[in-house]
């Protein structure tokens, strides 16, 4: 299977990370040419977060998701399943950006599906409120804040006038709260080893935008304008990456990477740890 990308044809291991993380382990950076050939460091396949393991009791399977890097940067990903009855191990390649995997595995497509990896263990989750209950909403396809059926402004940076300019310059919907009152939005995008997304919350009861500022020292909610969000250079705001833990809880509590946000009261509790998840 694709796990063999960790060795070359002679069996020599090529998947070991160097201490520096970006080098090749022999003094050369990843991609540096060696006799006319490029030598690329390969990352081992491994779980990226606690969400990558679960037990599917109904299907009788233990499911493990492994990949070479986080969701934003990954080139190779696969699912590994073990039957609780027979203990047979099966695999399925789910991502192969560079077409390295001739064998895509033998795990049946109806097992360990990505959209069935469980939700936080929560009792009494309220049903979403009908959309018409709240006067404001966000049309992501038009990047437009709506009040009823009337446009109330675009949630974009100045100069982002068409879809080709929208990525990282217009608000995108991350998720909606259980009652429907709050929409978690991301807008500003910054790239390095990870792709960071700055977050803000839209209150559909009054159309106001809120952001968590100074998240690592004295986090607090601050009301902002669209222009302020997209001009946040030099100001620390709460952001996330592809494998961040973001979950809505009952009563519109929001869990983000160890922080419990209560938007209605504008309060934040730094708790740490991870949510308990269903097996």
Image: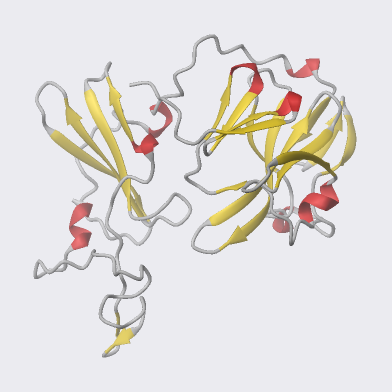
Residue 73 lies left or right of residue 105; in this view the side is: right
Question: Looking at this rendering, what residue extends furthest in the front direction?
Answer: 218
Q: Quadrant of residue 196?
A: bottom right
Q: Quadrant of residue 50?
A: top left
Return the x and y of residue 129 as percentages of the image width and height. Answer: 70, 14
Return the x and y of residue 245 as percentages of the image width and height. Answer: 50, 37
Q: Residue at x 16, y 68 (%)?
A: 8
Count the labels in the image.
0
Question: Looking at this rendering, what residue extends furthest in the top direction?
Answer: 124
Return the x and y of residue 4 as percentages of the image width and height. Answer: 18, 57
User: Is 209 drawn above or below residue 241 in the view shown?
Assistant: above
**Depth order, front residue of 100/247:** 247
Q: Quadrant of the C terminus?
A: top left
User: Is 43 drawn above or below residue 278 in the view shown?
Assistant: below
**Depth order, front residue of 95/118:** 118
Q: Residue at x 12, y 69 (%)?
A: 12
How are the residues colored?
secondary structure
Return the x and y of residue 273 as percentages of the image width and height. Answer: 45, 35
Residue 66 lies left or right of residue 236; in this view the side is: left
Residue 147 lies left or right of residue 240; in this view the side is: right
User: Is 16 drawn above or below residue 208 in the view shown?
Assistant: below
Residue 123 lies left or right of residue 180; in this view the side is: left
């Amino acid at each position: 299977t694709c796990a063999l990308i960790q060795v070359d044809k002679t069996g020599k291991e090529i998947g070991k990370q160097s201490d520096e993380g970006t080098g090749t382990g022999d003094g050369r950076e990843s991609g540096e040419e060696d006799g006319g050939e490029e030598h690329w460091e390969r990352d081992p396949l491994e779980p990226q977060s606690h969400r990558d393991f679960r037990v599917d009791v109904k299907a009788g399977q233990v499911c493990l998701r492994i990949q070479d890097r986080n969701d934003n940067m990954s080139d190779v990903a696969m699912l590994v399943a073990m039957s609780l009855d027979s203990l047979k191990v099966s695999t399925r390649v789910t991502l192969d950006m560079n077409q390295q995997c001739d064998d895509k595995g033998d795990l049946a497509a109806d097992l360990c599906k990505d959209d069935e990896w469980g939700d936080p263990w929560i009792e009494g989750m309220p049903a979403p409120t009908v959309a018409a209950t709240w006067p404001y909403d966000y049309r992501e396809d038009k990047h437009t804040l709506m009040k009823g059926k009337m446009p109330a402004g675009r949630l974009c940076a100045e100069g982002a006038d068409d879809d080709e300019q929208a990525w990282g310059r217009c608000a995108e919907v991350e998720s909606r709260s259980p009652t429907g009152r709050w929409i978690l939005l991301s807008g500003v995008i910054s790239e390095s080893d990870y792709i960071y997304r700055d977050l803000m919350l839209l209150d559909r009861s009054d159309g106001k935008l809120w952001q968590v500022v100074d998240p690592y020292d004295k986090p607090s909610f601050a009301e902002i304008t669209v222009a302020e969000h997209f001009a946040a250079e030099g100001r620390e705001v709460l952001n996330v990456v592809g494998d961040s833990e973001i979950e809505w809880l009952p009563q519109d509590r929001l869990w983000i990477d160890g922080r419990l946000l209560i938007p209605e009261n504008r309060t934040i509790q730094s708790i740490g740890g991870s949510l308990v998840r269903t097996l």
